[in-house]
C-alpha cells in the first residue's frame, strides 16, 4: 500500500473499479475486419487513420484519462500489495499490514504446506489459497508431521545401535 491513509486507499480502490467498468476494450485498428490481425493493441500511426484522428464511430484509443488512481495502482483489489513467494526465506520479509503473498505455481506440496503454516503464524494473507486446497493441505500437513515423527523415532532407535547392528 503506497498510501498510508486507509480511507483514501479504499476510495482510490473504489474509483479504480468504476474506471475499469467504463474503460473500453482497446483494439487494433481493423482487427475486426481481418482474421490475420489480432485484437492486441497497436497505436494507429497512418496519416489518414480515422482512429488516430479520434473520429466519431471509431474505437477509442488509449489515453492517460483511462488510467487508475496512483494510490491504487499495482494493488490487489483487496488493497494489499502482491508478493510472489517461492520459498520460506521470501516470506520473512513480508509486512502483513501492507502486503499479501501469492505462492508460485512451481512450489511443491511440502514447501507449500510450510509456507502456508508460516503465513498463518505471521497473519499474512494468502491470495491463491482455495477452499478445496485448504482441506487438501491440512491432510498433507498431517502426513508430513507423521513422517517427521517417524523419522525422529527411527533416529532415536538407531542411536543405541553401533555400525555392526549390535547394542
Image: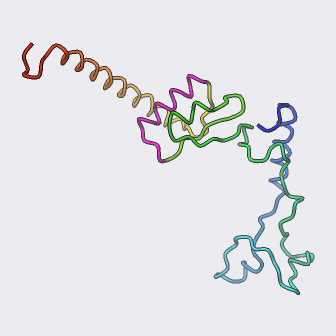
Residue, far bottom: 48
- What's drawn in magenta, residue-wise? 106-122
Residue drawn at 47 percent across, 47 percent down:
106
Q: Quadrant of residue 71?
A: top right
Quadrant location, the C terminus: top left
Q: Residue at x 18, y 18 (%)?
A: 158
Q: Main secondary structure of the magenta part?
A: helix
- Left or right of 85, for residue 95: right
Reply yes or no: does residue 110 show up in magenta.
yes
- The residue sitting at the front extreme is 163
Residue at horizontal 59 percent and vertical 41 percent from the top: 102
Seen in the picture, residue 103 relative to 46 is either above or below; the reply is: above
Looking at the picture, how far across and down is residue 9, in whole percent?
83, 37
Residue 133 position within the rendered picture, expressed as x and y whole percent measured from the top left: 49, 37
Q: Is residue 164 above or below residue 85?
A: above
Q: How is colour applied across the structure in the image? A: rainbow
The answer to which image quadrant residue 37 occupies is bottom right
Q: Position of residue 103 (x, y in %)?
A: 54, 41
Q: Residue 124 magenta-drawn?
A: no
Amino acid at each position: 500500500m503506497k498510501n498510508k491513509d486507509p480511507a483514501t486507499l479504499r476510495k482510490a480502490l473504489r474509483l479504480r473499479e468504476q474506471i475499469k467498468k467504463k474503460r473500453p476494450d482497446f483494439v487494433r485498428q481493423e482487427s475486426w475486419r481481418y482474421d490475420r490481425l489480432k485484437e492486441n493493441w497497436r497505436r494507429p500511426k497512418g496519416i489518414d487513420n480515422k482512429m488516430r484522428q479520434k473520429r466519431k464511430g471509431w474505437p477509442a484509443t488509449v489515453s492517460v484519462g483511462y488510467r487508475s488512481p496512483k494510490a491504487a495502482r499495482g494493488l490487489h483489489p483487496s488493497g494489499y500489495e502482491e508478493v510472489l513467494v517461492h520459498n520460506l526465506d521470501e516470506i520473512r520479509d513480508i509486512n502483513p499490514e501492507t502486503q499479501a503473498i501469492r505462492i508460485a505455481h512451481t512450489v511443491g506440496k511440502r514447501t507449500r504446506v510450510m509456507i502456508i503454516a508460516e503465513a498463518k503464524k505471521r497473519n499474512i494473507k494468502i491470495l491463491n489459497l482455495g477452499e478445496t486446497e485448504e482441506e487438501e493441505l491440512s491432510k498433507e500437513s498431517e502426513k508430513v508431521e507423521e513422517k517427521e515423527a517417524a523419522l525422529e523415532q527411527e533416529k532415536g532407535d538407531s542411536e543405541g545401535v553401533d555400525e555392526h547392528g549390535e547394542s
